[in-house]
């Protein structure tokens, strides 16, 4: 599997020719937020290539997301994280061969690596078709660019969504539209029955992969008590033991809060889609909330919202990203929440 030769002939897509690409393979495997960030690029490409359809390689656990986009015909799940942990097992290698065969069974007009990592670059070389990706100055791992027949610039200072759109536009040979013209293109999700989940509720996405991105628990309590006092339900999801324990501690001060059972991404997506407002830290689920056109407030103690903040579609309810000590005070955050609840789309981030 992992013996792709850098000397193989790879035909670069001719971005200067008339657009004729109909069937592409997108390699964007992780993380949740990264997968969501690729969706607007595909939606924009559909406008320029009306008959475009795509296959998509995504890591298991996130692979349901591309399937919600109308241009995606087939999702090919990868399990690189799990395979690395069990690389000596025979079943792992059988899964790897099935994965390779699934990618190799189609001939693509373009294979696009939207991730810029060595692992994603290697995956592109299993596919049949011209390969494009980020150049060495734009890729997260510059050596990945050696695997591509066509390389394009997408400056790292830009927001991730803009970088993906710029990469796709260059690879297919059209001009990217206005930066604010974001269209995720996701289909609506059916509701899921959860005991206690009734009426208008605020979904509190308190979990994130890195502890430095977390919002202090004491501040969550102060913020959510104000939310509850306004008559809104408070819903607390969790995905691991650390998050479950935090949800239980928060619920002590919020007796009416609903702690969700552990859910898969598809069910949790329907809870997100039904929320009246989503509050959350820097997590992929906040980006999914934006993709479902939910109003929300993102809390960014450390990461810069200009590059990583959740972005809503231009005509959707506001998604406001807050950073800086004063803006993140619970009372200030609640002021923004109230503005969103009243439908004010003119709220400005800090």
Image: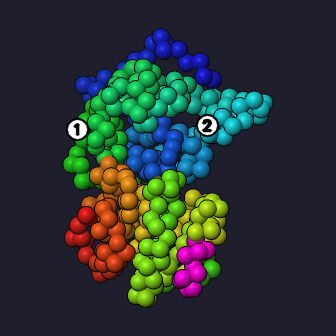
* In the foreground, 328 or 341: 328
Q: What residue is drawn where x is 51% and y is 43%?
A: 30
Considering only vertical position in the picture, is 111 above or below 10?
below
User: Magenta part of the protein: which range?
Assistant: 247-256
Task: Determine whether the residue tagged by mark 2 lies in a helix, strand or loop.
Answer: helix
Q: Quadrant of residue 20?
A: top left
Question: Which of the labelled discs sits on residue 175, or is there none?
Answer: 1
Q: Earlier in the sequence, mark 2 or mark 1?
A: 2
Rounded to the nearest angstrom, the CA distance separating label 2 from label 1 is: 34 Å
Left or right side of 11 for 256? right
Residue of label 2: 80
Per the picture, the main secondary structure of the magenta-coloured stretch is: helix
Q: Position of residue 8 (x, y in %)?
A: 49, 12
* In the foreground, 143 or 73: 143
Graded by Cα atoms within 10 Å as few (under 14), some (14 to 19) or many (20 or more), the crowding at tag 1 reads few
Graded by Cα atoms within 10 Å as few (under 14), some (14 to 19) or many (20 or more), the crowding at tag 2 reads some
* In the foreground, 296 or 298: 298
Task: Determine whether the residue tagged by mark 1 lies in a helix, strand or loop.
Answer: loop
């Amino acid at each position: 599997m992992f013996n792709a030769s850098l000397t193989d002939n790879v035909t670069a897509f001719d971005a200067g020719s008339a657009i004729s690409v109909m069937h592409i393979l997108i390699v964007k495997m992780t993380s949740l937020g990264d997968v969501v960030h690729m969706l607007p690029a595909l939606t924009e490409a559909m406008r320029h290539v009306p008959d475009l359809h795509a296959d998509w390689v995504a890591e298991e656990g996130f692979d349901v997301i591309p399937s919600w986009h109308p241009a995606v015909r087939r999702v090919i799940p990868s399990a690189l994280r799990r395979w690395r942990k069990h690389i000596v097992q025979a079943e792992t290698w059988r899964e790897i061969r099935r994965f390779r065969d699934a990618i190799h069974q189609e001939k693509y007009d373009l294979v696009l690596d939207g991730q810029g990592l060595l692992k994603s670059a290697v995956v592109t070389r299993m596919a049949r078709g011209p390969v494009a990706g980020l150049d060495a100055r734009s890729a997260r791992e510059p050596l990945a660019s050696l695997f591509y027949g066509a390389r394009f610039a997408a400056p790292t200072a830009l927001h991730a969504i803009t970088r993906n759109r710029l990469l796709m536009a260059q690879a297919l040979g059209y001009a990217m539209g206005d930066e604010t013209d974001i269209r995720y293109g996701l289909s609506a999700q059916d509701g899921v029955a959860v005991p206690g989940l009734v009426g208008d509720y605020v979904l509190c996405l308190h979990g994130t992969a890195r502890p430095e991105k977390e919002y202090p628990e004491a501040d969550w309590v102060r913020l959510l008590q104000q939310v509850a006092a306004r008559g809104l339900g408070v819903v607390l999801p969790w995905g691991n033991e650390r998050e479950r324990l935090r949800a239980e501690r928060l619920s002590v001060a919020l007796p009416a809060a609903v702690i969700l059972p552990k859910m898969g991404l598809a069910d949790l997506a329907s809870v997100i889609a039904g929320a009246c407002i989503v509050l959350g830290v820097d997590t992929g689920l906040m980006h999914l909330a934006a993709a479902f056109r939910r109003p929300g407030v993102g809390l960014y103690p450390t990461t810069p919202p200009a590059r990583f903040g959740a972005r809503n579609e231009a005509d959707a309810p506001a998604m406001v990203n807050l950073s800086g000590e004063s803006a993140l005070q619970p009372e200030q955050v609640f002021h923004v929440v109230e503005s969103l609840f009243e439908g004010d789309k003119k709220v400005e981030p800090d």
